[in-house]
Image (spheres, grey):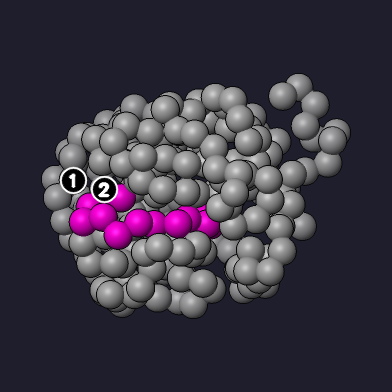
Amino acid sequence: MSILNEAKLILPFAEGGGSIAYDRSGNKNHGTIVGAGWETSNQHFGPSALSLDDLDDYVHGTSAFGDVDFRNQAFGISLWAYPNASADQDPLITLGAATAGNHIVNFIYDGNNDRLLARLHQANNALTNRSGIHTASGAGLAGGWQHFMLEHDGTGTMDLARSEAYIGNVASATTNSVGSFGAFQSNSYRVGRDSGAQYYGDYIQQVIVLPRVFTAAERSFLWNGGAGRFVDLAIPRRRLEGY
């Protein structure tokens, strides 16, 4: 399966304990778990999910992409989340390092409007050079497991011509979104935290970051796998040596 060979990051959160989230992509972009616990009874599939509060829990790691300009870097993100009904903008994952001129990506569950937000903005000036998309409000996403995907083709700003968000394998982006942003991050990725001090609160599983958009077959595989069976993306033992 090409996802296993090409992914920059695969975090199944299947460890069920400990303070390290192991990257199964072969790139050793392991994440340090800060405060979060493990859910072993209400996970969507597999042995466990990561459980985060919306106060100070998150996962951070380095070198998922390094210092890149995401306007010119194609990427795809896939994850399973169990968003709650809070009136917050809960960050699912943030990509990018805070190098001057670099661009970072925020993928967010917007509990205020029950929708997804995706934003691309410049690290050295968080209030300019920003763009984004969002899905329709009132989607009924809170209180259950959902499959979310975000894609950008790497040909410029994040807008409907170049980017798409998926809910349950359905293309769902409806309009462009421009908003204000907080301070930018210093790590290459964060799960459950944005570039400032906003946090996601609830469960999350199987985060995948690809340096391209997903194919239709890959979207279907990831969605159908989570809906009915555990998609075990742990790669062969020979690729796990040295962990």
Q: Position of residue 143 (x, y in %)?
A: 40, 63
- Residue at 46 percent across and 70 percent down: it is 166
Of callouts 2 and 1, which one flags the residue occurring earlier in the amino acid sequence? 2
Q: Residues within 10 Å of mark 1 (few under 14, many from 20)?
A: some
- Residue at 34 percent across and 27 percent down: it is 186
Q: Closest to the observer: 234 or 180?
A: 234
The C terminus sits in image quarter:
top right
Q: Is residue 83 magenta?
A: yes
Residue beneath disc 2: 121
Q: Is residue 31 magenta?
A: no
In the image, is residue 70 above or below residue 173?
A: above
Which element type, helix, strand or loop, lies under badge 2? strand
Q: Amino acid at mark 1?
A: Phe
Horizontally, is 24 left or right of 198 in the view? right
Q: Are marks 2 and 1 in contact (CB under 8 Å)?
A: yes
Q: Which residues are magenta?
A: 76-90
Q: Position of residue 70 (x, y in %)?
A: 39, 48
- Residue at 77 percent across and 57 percent down: it is 1
In the image, is residue 182 above or below residue 143?
A: above
Q: Closest to the observer: 231 or 203?
A: 203
In the image, is residue 113 above or below residue 31?
A: below
Q: Position of residue 42 (x, y in %)?
A: 56, 53
In the image, is residue 67 above or below residue 76?
A: above
Quadrant assignment, res 30: top right
